[in-house]
Image: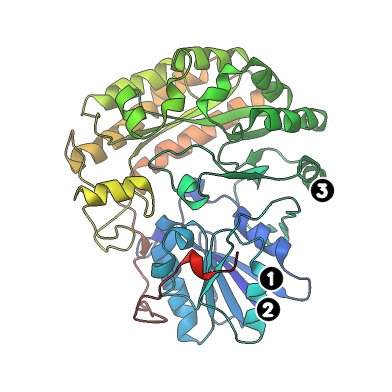
Amino acid sequence: MKVTLIQPCIGRRAGQKDYIGTWQMEPLTIAVLAGLTPADIELKLYDDRLEKIDYDDPTDLVAITVETYTAKRGYQIASRYREKGIPVVIGGFHATLCPEEVSQYAEAVIVGECETLWHQVLEDASVDGLQPYYYAVKRPGLRFQIPDRTLFQRKKYLPVTLLEAGRGCPLSCEFCAVCTAFRGSRTTRLHDGVIEELRRMGKKKLLFFVDDNFSANLAEAKQLLRKLIPLRIRWVSQMSLDAAYDEEFLDLLAKSGCQGVLIGFESLNDDNLMQMNKGVNLKEDGFDKALANLRRHSIRLYATFVFGYDGDTIDCFKATVAFAQEHRFYIAAFNHLTPFPGTPLYSRLENEGRLRYERWWLDGNYTYNDIPFQPRGMSPLQLQQGCIDARKSFFSIPGIWNRSLDRVNRNDFAMWLQFFGINWSIKKEISERNNFPLGDQGETQPLIRVRQDVLAFSPENFTK
């Protein structure tokens, strides 16, 4: 049997050839699927961000992984294959958040994680017996995960290798699709499995632990960090701000080769943080002490901020940019609040009648950076423009230069050189991303539904 794996892009303007550069990271989910696939099955990968999909390439099954932003494009690709009579299975975050919607465009939907389900999907597909839904009642462990990256060879991804030590986050932020999809829990891999994977990889320039919250369990994280130290690797990851108060953790972080971390600061407004259920950011003495601790250990920061909560007004943008410039973050993101389906935020805004689109991710009038809800403290246009202006200010040439002189940002020559490339790429893409379409504007194939009626999904229908 031949199986075609597809990573869809977010979209494409009509006639566009080159895709946005910083969106072209290797898809770890594909490597996980490849590692779970029996050796007698032939696999082919098409990454829609890098290459043209050959719909005439013979295959027996197509598997597409989708997030909410790539759902529309994923349905377009599925329709192309379904027109040829080739069955399609769709998984990923959006399939978990909106299984009934996804089931209209695929013969089978993987709801949740694939580790305990993929073999059954392949077995059923081999006898034309695909079920409409595959669901694991319990979260699968990651103990024996062995990703296979051979499908990435000769594809021009960014020079960053993705891997994970854990998946999910125990926090319960209102806006977070991760918390919803993983039901507020986190699973981890055996540390020896992580170390073995790193040794198999050989020397890599930079590794990215894509863990949703690397520091979710500090005792466990410290054990892994001690094992990473002898490997002399260079890596980055994501963590919550409260971990910055643990001196032992920060010391191990630096010694293990950590080059930087992404931290969601989200807002400078305490009321906003409480509304989004991110009180963890208010612990100890707030941001200043945490930032001082991180600076003392020379940990670079990718700081993220979100605008549009009820306490935000048009004055919040300049104050946040000034804060980011004052602390000379390596990079920063200034994003509008996005209500992802299935999250508590989406339900709240829907109940309050504040959603501007029924399903923004499928609406033909919605484009990237558009605001899919009605803010309280400003207009949607003011929120959109405020985010754009914040990015332009932070990534201005003087802003980039001033941050490049920071002691932490320049204490490693390789990371200092990358600083200019990364910041310049983000600066160049600010306008390119604005009003970017969801789905390929040049696609002429209408969406083909597997079924017109909604096929109800209920976890209770699956054996515990």
Q: Please, is residue 316 above or below residue 435 in the view?
A: above
Image mark for residue 200? 3
Q: Is residue 9 left or right of residue 56?
A: left
Report whether 309 appears left or right of 447.
Answer: left
Q: Is residue 244 visible?
A: yes
**Residue at 51% of width from left, 21% of height from top?**
404
- Three-letter amino acid code at the position of disc 2: Glu
Q: Residues within 10 Å of mark 2 (few under 14, many from 20)?
A: few
Badge count: 3
Q: Nearer the viewer, mark 2 or mark 3?
A: 2
Whether residue 104 sits left or right of residue 118 in the image: it is left
Q: Are marks 1 and 2 in contact (CB under 8 Å)?
A: yes
Tag 3 or tag 1, which sits nearer the N-term? 1
User: Where in the figure is residue 297, as x and y percent of width and height?
Assistant: 63, 16
Mark 2 vs 3: CB contact within 8 A: no
Q: Nearer the viewer, mark 1 or mark 3?
A: 1
Counting residues from the N terminus, which is met first, the one under dot 2 or under dot 3? 2
**Where is mark 1, residue-wise?**
119
Specify few, some or many for label 1: CA neighbours under 10 Å numbering under 14, 14-19, or 20 or more: some
Label 3: element kind: helix
**Element marked by disc 1:** helix
Q: Amino acid at mark 3?
A: Arg
Say which amino acid is labelled 1.
His
Q: Write the residue at 83% across / 29% down.
A: 230
**Which image quarter: residue 135?**
bottom right
Is 231 situated above or below 50? above
Q: Find residue 89 and report its image quarter.
A: bottom right
Q: Position of residue 229 (x, y in %)?
A: 78, 28
Residue at point 68% right, 17% down?
248
Q: Which mark is residue 123?
A: 2
Q: Is residue 338 above or below residue 283?
A: below
